[in-house]
Image: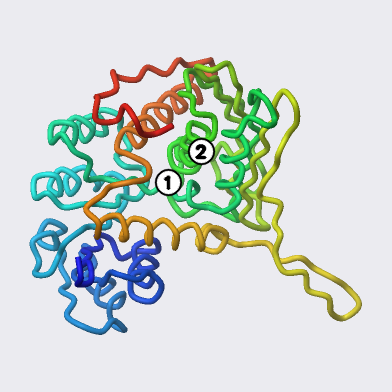
Amino acid sequence: MAELLGVAVLGAGHMGADHIRRLDQVVSGARVAAVADPDLDRAKEAVAALDGVVTVHADPLAALAAPGVDAVLIASPGPAHEEPLLACFERGLPVLCEKPMVPDSTGALRVVEAEAGLGRRLAQIGFMRRYDAEYGRLKSLLDGGGLGRPLMLHCTHRNVSSPPGFTSAMLINSSVSHEIDAARWLLGQELTAVTVLRPRPSAGAPEGLLDPQLVLFETDGGAVVDVEVFVNCGFGYQVRCEAVCEQGSARIGEDHTMLVTAAGGAREEVAQDYLVRFADAYDREVQAWVAATRQGRVTGPSAWDGYASSVVAEAGVRALESGGRTAVALAPRPDLYADVSR
């Protein structure tokens, strides 16, 4: 493909606007051809600085049919993902869909079955931690076997504050969904059960929000994964992961950022949100998607990975509500995904 890949971006909010900027200023081989958002003023603002013809739509399906659209990047809220994903499959359009692919497992399975029915992959799901340099090194180390069999993953996921309307369930199905995929990918194992422990909520948490939580996962390979999720820690955005293996351990996410010394003191910068901490991972992810799409290929996390994450997150929410251990039950994996995800 000699010409630039024309991309329709669905959603012009915090994530969507950043992807529009990324496609315009960072990624090579692509251009923004159309943008859709129910808030037309927000969509127009997101494309105001772009060169070339960019059409703006309130209806996401209209954006898919806009002139010059070769592929689609979905960055709208999770509940709005299923319809455009299925529409992309009907039109044969490659699509990069932000997580969650579809929040409810029933809808996620419909997406998996629809793509499997095509007999070829069109969707890549936006689990961008797989493109982070530190996570990549940890994955290579574990796959190499030099530390022996992984026994445990210790994970930390902290945010400065939660947005308005954030619920206790969203700590699992929104925040911890990243750790769900990262654990499956790093270990090459499926998660089979979830238990959620609820300490007394932090004084910094909004009224009624169970924050923090400790989420425990069991795997089909005999490993255990624990995730401390704390979305109102108040001081910064921190994501860490330590793999404990039979012959050693490895830890990533130690905030190796700028150290500033001034006025008789020193301070180390702490990232304030995910767009700062994982900026390079997002750049790598979208560049890899564009490059593969221009070559007629689909790589990266699959629709099966999106489905598995939704199933595990639903089990986690049930465990949060019941206070007990909850088993994870996945549907049979279609042959299309037999050689991906691990």
Residue 127, numbered label:
1
Crowd rating for badge 1 (residues with CA inside 10 Å; few <14, some 14–19, many 20+): many
- Tell me if label 2 and label 1 are in contact, CB under 8 Å: yes
Q: Is residue 64 left or right of residue 327?
A: left
Q: Residue at x 57, y 33 (%)?
A: 143
At a point 63% along the width and 51% down the height, the residue shown is: 238
Residue 153 vertical placement versus 55 (above, below): above
Residue under the image location 60 percent in, 21 percent down: 223
Task: Say what amino acid the circle numbered 1 marks.
Answer: Phe
Label 2 – label 1 distance at C-alpha? 8 Å
Query: Which of the 4 quarters of the picture holds residue 333?
Result: top left
Q: How many marks?
A: 2
Q: What x and y, as percent, mark residue 304?
A: 32, 32
In the rendered image, the vertical position of residue 333 relative to residue 174, given as above or below: above
List the residue tagged with mark 2. 182
- Image side of residue 300 versus residue 184, left or right: left
- The quadrant of the picture occupied by the C terminus is top left
Please determine whether, in this image, residue 269 is positioned above or below residue 230: below
**Would residue 134 appear left or right of 125 to someone viewing this image?**
right
In this view, the residue farthest toward the right is: 264
Assign the N terminus to one quadrant of the image.
Answer: bottom left
Colour pattern of the rendering: rainbow
Which disc, if any, is residue 105?
none
**SS category of the residue bearing label 2:** helix
